[in-house]
Image (cartoon, rainbow, N blue to C red):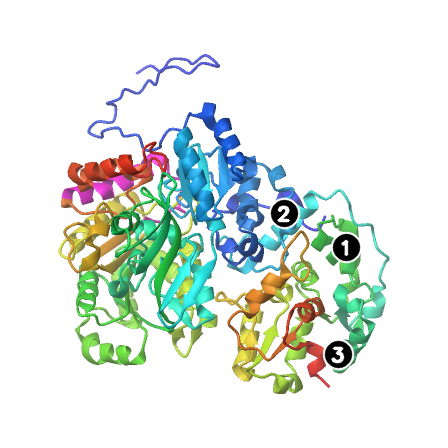
Amino acid sequence: MEIPVIPLGELPPCPVAPDALQGIPRQQTNPSRWQGQAQWRDFVAALQADSVEVIEADGMRGVYQTDAGGLANGLCHGVVMAESAEQIAILMKRAQEFAVPVTLRGGGLTTEGESVAYGGVMLDMTGMKKVVAVDTEALTVRTQPGIFWHRLAEVLRRDGMDYLSAPLNLTSSVGGTIGVGGIDVNSCKYGCSADQVLSLQIVTPTGEVLECSDNENPEWFERIILGYGQFGIITEVTLRIRPYTPMRMHYFYYASLRSAIEDLQQLDANEVCDYSGILTMMDKAITLLVGFDSAQQEKIFFDQWRGQLKGGSELGFGLRLIGYYVLHPWRIREALFLLNRKRDLFPDLQPPEHMCNGELLDRTAVFSRAVWKHWGHKHMVIPDLATNVDKFVEAVERGNEVCKKYFKHYTLYCVGIRLREDHQAHYELSSIPPDAKGISYGCEFEPMLDERDYSRDELQSFKNDIYDIGVDMQTSYYRFGGMMKGYIRRALGDEVVNKHLAMKRELDPAMILNRDVIF
Amino acid sequence: MLYPAEKIDVSRCHGCGLCAMVCPVYQQGGNVMRTPHGLAKASQRDPELVREDVFACVLCGACAPLCPQDIDLMQMLIAMRSAFSHEPLPAGEQGKSADQKGRVVFVADRALLADEEQLDKVMDLLGHEKAVLASDQGDDISEAMQSGRQVNFDRLHQFLTTLQPVKKIIISDGLLQSVIRSKLPQISMQSLGQLLSSQQAFRRKLKASDFYMMDSQSYHADYQNMLAYYDALYCETECQLSRDLHRLAIPTGAHAKNGFDSKAQIDWLLQGRKVKRIVVESLADYHLLTKHCEQPVSYISELLP
């Protein structure tokens, strides 16, 4: 094929034919920038007349240029700092009137560009981050949605309280988490963070302020929880809380993913522990994390369950690994990687300043830094699969093979998520698989990208390969918005997607709220 | 210049936001542009864009130990401030280094230097160390860093030269402590707070109902050592410490300029705590707390005979 010489100043037609990538249908992964500059100035003037400030300074807009994934880049026209439900209601009314997209952002921890604005308004919800009230008798907290989970933990701790479950990365905001789920190592017991919500105050896409819960405006409650920000903006949340307890953590080591998952599922099914999860270094060193809130529960585990686990101690597993690499000396680099990784990572999961009598005092603080220190990168690619109990082993094993195909080093992170029967309606069009009963499982596939630079195409191909497994196995995903939204119909089917699209069109006539995240 | 602006590698910031999580300015104002994260991200686009916001930082140093990229955030913030300063610091008077050879010297913070009575009391308490007041206090350098004026290399060199032959430095200025630590790592150094609070006479008087306010700048300047030190202090006395869940010292914002609400910050520090007395390491914190708190406040030296 001859590629023509391109004269300066002209952009010729793309020489690559649309079907050049045989067998791979081409999909637009990055949304185009909103082109409605014509009405932008009128929109800003209308907001200013309503006393809503729009910040158009370059520096401020630049801060929101990308998200934690670092692969999607877009620039909003202006930023609005969230202040109150009333202010947001005015913004939404004007945005509907002028058809200006409004993108919400909390901690900006999306990986597929869901919190990146491709033009229009960036509504920074972290402007609303006050704790309204803590009720230590009713065990509830009322808070604004832009607060980081870390700050919420700080406030609750002053009253000897803690949240039930929150994402391990605590710079996530409460509102953003509720919109997508929020998985913790105690989700096997408490479910996802979104299931801790008792009630919400929301602003609808057309600018109404409503209170909703299981009993009040329940149809709104159903749509907002795990709604990927499509149907409204959370402006206040009431969450369940609990008395604070330090955590007793134990690690068991496996050489087989299947064995570790079977043990994890056995512990979860029998409600043996308060915290559980699997963290791996490739498929060579697989660690089952088992944690407890009380010494009593811990004792029951060691008396009745420890003997049934197939996992070994650190020493036993270490000796076994040494044996393996003695017999496979050409894999010495891999052995060194495992050794170095363990040396770097494990102390940060149990730092002495956060330990007391063998108990981890502040998992909130420990995990959030460890996540960024050991898995953080300018690009974060974390495709995932969420399945019912029966499909999980196969999904993880197939995903593991995909990881091996693309990367030398990677981590798998698996957790169980307890489901609420009464919240089935919340789970529609979400990461919770429709065929899961009682408990579902999620696995994140996280490559380590430090070895070399990867092109966007390589990373996208990796994500596609993981999500193709999901389509094949008819499961769900956690990160299906933004750049991965091409998979939504394939995975969840036309019927569900069309139902939600119809609701979206009715509730958000100009289709402006978090555009291109799902619809 | 103290830290050359061209050596700040803001491109290493991934935007994780951990610094914002513990930033008192962000917690109060909610403006991401005033966090190290926001400043680094905006600088990646155009360094000029942070001209105003960089001066909102209270330089408490809480962000620095938390950065997973190990960016020296204090260095970044100070360098950014001085890059926008048009008011360089004049060269000071030459200190006499010969006088200090082999001695233990005390480098006092500005608030202490201004309070003759307290300074005398502190020097008495340092008697057992045979400490003398440093011939060059470097308080103009500290003030320049705090206010964002450029510290020229000659002045800094002059100050450090006077300290080079000393045996040990005792210091109550956290900002200077981090500079000296990075430039003269071979010299033994201890914060005044640590030195005084390690005395048994002091520890005997500290109770579980006391709220002990660390000097946040000193604490974060030597974070790893301070963690262990204050853990031990807590274990022995059970006093309440001004630390957050990350084991970082919550600052009062005593040195803050540009509209930081110190009263709101003190309210947050004391929220939910049952405190009968507040003991402070920093005289600047002492002045602020006596103004805003109902509880009695004691400067650290007051608990020692």
On the rendered structure, is A291 left or right of A83? left
Q: Is residue B180 visible?
A: yes
Q: Main secondary structure of the magenta part?
A: helix
Please state which of the two labelled residues, at mark 1 or mark 3, is closer to the viewer. 3
- Residue holding disc 2: B54
User: Which residue appears at 41% of the width and 79% of the height?
Assistant: A357
Is A459 part of what is drawn in magenta? yes
Q: Residue A279 bears which disc, if any?
A: none
Is A89 part of what is drawn in magenta? no
Marks 2, 3 in one chain: yes
Res B186 quadrant in image: bottom right
Q: Position of residue A150 (x, y in %)?
A: 44, 60
Q: Earlier in the sequence, mark 2 or mark 1?
A: 2
**Magenta part of the protein: which range?**
A446-472
Looking at the rendered structure, the kind of residue marked 2 is Val
Looking at the rendered structure, the kind of residue marked 3 is Leu
Q: Is residue A70 visible?
A: no
Q: Nearer the viewer, residue A221 or A186?
A: A221
- Residue holding disc 1: B157
Please state which of the two labelled residues, at mark 2 or mark 3, is closer to the viewer. 2
- Residue holding disc 3: B126
Look at the numbered disc 3 and give the secondary structure of its residue.
helix
Q: Earlier in the sequence, mark 2 or mark 3?
A: 2
User: Which residue appears at 59% of the width and 62% of the height?
Assistant: B265
Q: Nearer the viewer, residue A25 or B85?
A: B85
Look at the numbered disc 2 and give the secondary structure of its residue.
helix
Chain to which the residue tagged by mark 2 belongs: B
Looking at the rendered structure, the kind of residue marked 1 is His
Marks 1, 3 in one chain: yes
